Image (spheres, rainbow, N blue to C red):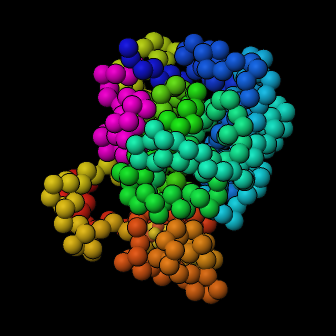
Amino acid sequence: MKHTVALIPVSTYDQAQVDAAVRQGVGLLGGVGQFVKPDEKIVLKPNLLARALPQKAITTHPAVFSAVCRLLREEGCKHLSYGDSPGSPTTTPDKAADTAGIAEAAAQYQVEKADFASGSVVAFPEGRTAKSFYLCKGVQEADALINICKMKTHALERITGAVKNQYGCITGVNKATGHAAYPNSDVFADMLADLNLCIKPRLHVMDGIVAMEGNGPSSGTPVNMNVLLFSADPVALDAVFAALVHLSPEAVPTCVSGAKYGLGVMDDASIEVVTPDGILTVSQAREKYGKADFDVFRGVIRKGFLFNFMPLLPFLQHRPKADLKKCIACGICEESCPVPEKAVHSGQGKKAKYDYKKCIRCYCCQEMCPVKAIEVYRHPLTKLLSGK
Ligand code: SF4
Ligand code: SF4
């Protein structure tokens, strides 16, 4: 049986139109009752990566969050809460939710704040890569989680969508520990697949009305993609996101790991895209709704050749690089670095200075820089060999 992704074209955050689009999208998947029961405790998980205004496209837009709240209330769901654990330990969930407009939307529908500031270890013995997670209390207390993610590029995983958004269910500083424990994009994606299998979100809703391209997930450029996506399968949903931006799901570690671990499917033949105008194949959806010039890294490193030599040729490795003209010496990159002895030093008047021998290329520093001073540097030779 094919895995279904619902795609609703919508080009505005006008609340009435987004409300209608969310109702239609969930309806195409069979309705709210397919995913949750009215008496269950449901936690909503938007993307609240940083303290950012909605128009920056870093966080889930409040109109999408609000539409999901409204739909659940209309369907009689009584116990709703929400939360996310932001990327930086210095940003609290409350501050991020206030700035993103999510707190106000939640208040309108009496959706309570869940505890995403504290948590405890949850064992996951069946995990293939991760055997336990430090999960937020708000996630542990819920019967069901609905993932309301944002369509964005990502320095480590190329894109961040449905699968990656669950990383915000890990409490503050433990996220940095996770980057150190799973120190490359493939093993990190394996861990994320386990995390999704542990949490088992019931439904994934992706805000792709205005997405982020380029230097994502926080320093990129907002771009109109004009879609909302819905699915019970986060891998299929991310594969459709990848298709819309003309990126092979094979190049997206979270899709590869998710398919490998049985979290979902990523191949076109196993996915159907349902739209208000009928059912499409993934390639038809790409033709009709995709954006070929979406700015995302599409290169494929030929693992049999270059990859094997990369550790021997450090100058070829991609790495974070700070533009010192933009750097304000805030120290956030050093704070965010999960390497105990720190691979970047900054703050107290000192601009960012990297020690690439210590760097694990997790890109937490790039994610957290408040002034977009950090980019991923790719050596021209690796770009050439990777076809980009
Ligand atoms: S986070 Fe950005 S602005 Fe702050 S010190 Fe690092 S590079 Fe400079
Ligand atoms: S310097 Fe940046 S990319 Fe390197 S380990 Fe630290 S946070 Fe990760």
Residue 189 visible in rendering: no
User: Which residue is at 76% across, 42% downward?
Assistant: 114
Left or right: residue 46 compared with residue 301: right
Where residue 282 sits, quadrant-wise, is top left
Which residue is at the far left?
A: 305
Q: Which residues are magenta?
A: 244-272
Answer whether residue 253 is magenta in the image.
yes
Verify whether residue 325 appears in magenta. no
**Is 375 rendered above or below residue 259?**
below
Quadrant that contains the N terminus: top left
Q: Position of residue 288 (x, y in %)?
A: 40, 26
Q: Which percent across, then down, holds residue 286?
A: 37, 29
Relative height, residue 20 to residue 134 (above, below): above
Residue 354, given in percent of the width and then of the height, sits at 44, 79
Q: Residue at x 43, y 57 (%)?
A: 182
Q: Nearer the viewer, residue 191 or 315?
A: 191
